Image: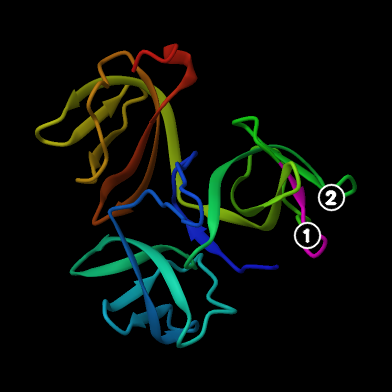
């Protein structure tokens, strides 16, 4: 039951419905691959146009005719894929708390644990690494069908300034971000500790997710 999945820049934790995959980027599309060029980092959907693909995303295993879910963000005058997965996958993104290939277990910082499927290898991954786990239910637990490193960058600090209208956030560490239009900012306020996940486009830090920290005591 191996499902290949690669992702760059996603949220720390995703809400998922049964049988669905959720990503945190500017836009999601589900479609059929018309073409895939791993060398040129490009793909096209039969009904969704053409995309460049972030250089850290591997496209091995994807082929024309595959049904996929992609998440994309604006990149210059085009669109760049920041996540791709087989349609119908269930997935969660987070930082590794512990991983033990010997005992076939991986636990994320959120506390969620998965038994590794027999063919899943996690060599080189360690605590603190950000990964996407695709999974399915197995008995009373959950089984990881794949564990893939996640690229992108993040920053965690208290909010220094926030402008929901202009969709900008400045953190106490001196960094500032333009926030993607689909990221919910309601309820966040100066002083809240957040993790911002971002990519740089045209010299501007573009935040594609803003995640309140547990340090806020659930008040954000």
Residue 83 horizontal/vertical position (percent)? 44, 61
Q: Any magenta on residue 117?
A: yes
Residue 155 horizontal/vertical position (percent)? 43, 34
Residue 84 horizontal/vertical position (percent)? 46, 66
Residue at 77 percent across and 52 percent down: it is 116
Residue 147 horizontal/vertical position (percent)? 66, 56
Q: Are marks 1 and 2 in contact (CB under 8 Å)?
A: yes
Query: Mark 2 sits on what residue?
Result: 101
Q: Quadrant of the C terminus?
A: top left
Image-based side of 145 in relation to 190, left or right: right
Where disc 2 sits, the SS reads loop
Image-based side of 29 in relation to 15, left or right: left
Q: Given the current orientation, which residue lies at the most extreme right position?
A: 102
Vertical position of residue 182 compared to residue 85: above or below? above
Q: Any magenta on residue 175?
A: no
* Quarter-of-image position of residue 121: bottom right
Distance between the alpha carbons at the discs numbered 1 and 2 = 7 Å
Residue at 45 percent across and 76 percent down: it is 67
Question: Crowding at label 2, few (<14), some or many (≥20) Cα neighbours within 10 Å?
Answer: some
The chief SS type of the magenta part is loop
Q: Quadrant of the N terminus?
A: bottom right
Magenta extent: 114-121
* Viewer-side residue, 204 vs 192: 192
Where disc 1 sits, the SS reads loop
Q: Which mark is residue 121?
A: 1
């Amino acid at each position: 039951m191996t499902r290949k999945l690669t992702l760059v820049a996603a949220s720390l934790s995703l809400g998922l419905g049964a049988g669905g995959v959720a990503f945190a980027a500017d836009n999601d599309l589900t479609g059929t691959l018309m073409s895939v060029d791993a060398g040129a980092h490009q793909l096209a959907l039969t009904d969704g146009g053409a995309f460049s693909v972030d250089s850290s995303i591997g496209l091995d295993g994807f082929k024309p005719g595959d049904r996929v879910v992609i998440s994309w963000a604006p990149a210059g005058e085009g669109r760049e894929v920041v996540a791709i997965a087989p349609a119908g996958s269930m997935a969660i993104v987070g930082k590794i708390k512990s991983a033990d290939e010997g005992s076939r277990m991986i636990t994320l910082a959120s506390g969620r644990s998965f038994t590794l499927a027999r063919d899943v290898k996690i060599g080189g991954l360690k605590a603190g690494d950000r990964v996407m786990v695709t999974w399915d239910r197995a008995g009373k637990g959950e089984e990881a069908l794949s564990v893939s490193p996640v690229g992108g960058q993040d920053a965690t600090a208290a909010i220094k300034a926030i402008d929901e209208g202009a969709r900008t956030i400045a953190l106490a560490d001196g960094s500032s971000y333009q926030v993607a239009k689909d990221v919910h900012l309601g309820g966040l306020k100066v002083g809240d500790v957040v993790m911002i996940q971002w990519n740089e486009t045209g010299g501007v830090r573009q935040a594609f997710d803003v995640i309140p920290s547990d340090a806020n005591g659930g008040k954000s």
